Image (tube, rainbow, N blue to C red):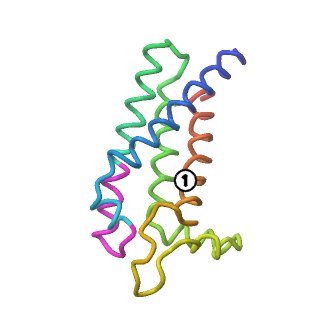
Amino acid sequence: MAMESAVTFAVVLATLLVAHNVADHWVQTSHQAGTKGDRGWVGRWACAKHVATYTAVTAGMVALVWAVFGLPITLGGFVGGQLVSAVTHYWADRRTTLAWLAALTRNDKFYRLGAPREGHDDNPSLGTGAYALDQAWHWLWLFIAALLTAVA
């Protein structure tokens, strides 16, 4: 049983990491990426739509490897893993929440690394501290989601 769980964890984690990269960078629309952190319902709705499509990709890919490899995943483990992934993804992608966590852990200076200066658009790139912390957060929770999927 332990070996089956370990193999399931490894397969699901690899699948979630690939699905995450595809869903976060190819499936997410430019509008969602640009507005999901906005205040109010516009931002919340954009983030919810992003997380819905993101979760459709991760669920579809995990379901595919589950079926192809005959993995010993329970429905509860599958749903629990997807729920952990979706909720934590939404939490981080609202942006103010992750900025708050960075400040709380004294990583606020790193969070702002590479960000455009106030009133300027002088660094439009993915190479920011906020992006690095966002991706690290998602990967942590994908690890936990894969564990939950494999053992629940």
Q: Is residue 82 left or right of residue 107?
A: left
Of the residues shown, which amino acid type is indicated by label 1?
A: Gln
Q: Is residue 32 above or below residue 73?
A: below
How far across and how far down the image is residue 71, in percent?
53, 16
Q: Determine the image quadrant of residue 128.
A: bottom right
Q: Is residue 58 above or below residue 3?
A: below
How far across and how far down the image is residue 137, in percent?
59, 54
Q: Is residue 151 left or right of residue 76?
A: right
Q: Is residue 113 magenta?
A: no
SS at mark 1? Answer: helix
Q: Main secondary structure of the magenta part?
A: helix
Residue placed at 43% from the left, 16% from the top?
67
Q: Is residue 36 left or right of residue 151?
A: left
User: Which contiguous range is marked in magenta?
Assistant: 37-51
Few, some or many residues within 10 Å of mark 1 (<14, 14–19, 20+): some
Q: How many marks?
A: 1
In the rendered image, which quarter contains the C terminus?
top right
Q: Is residue 39 magenta?
A: yes
Residue placed at 37% from the left, 30% from the top?
60
Q: Determine the image quadrant of residue 14.
A: top right
For disc 1, the marked residue is 135
Q: Is residue 1 above or below residue 82?
A: above
In the rendered image, which quarter contains the N terminus?
top right
Residue placed at 49% from the left, 13% from the top?
69
Residue placed at 50% from the left, 30% from the top?
15
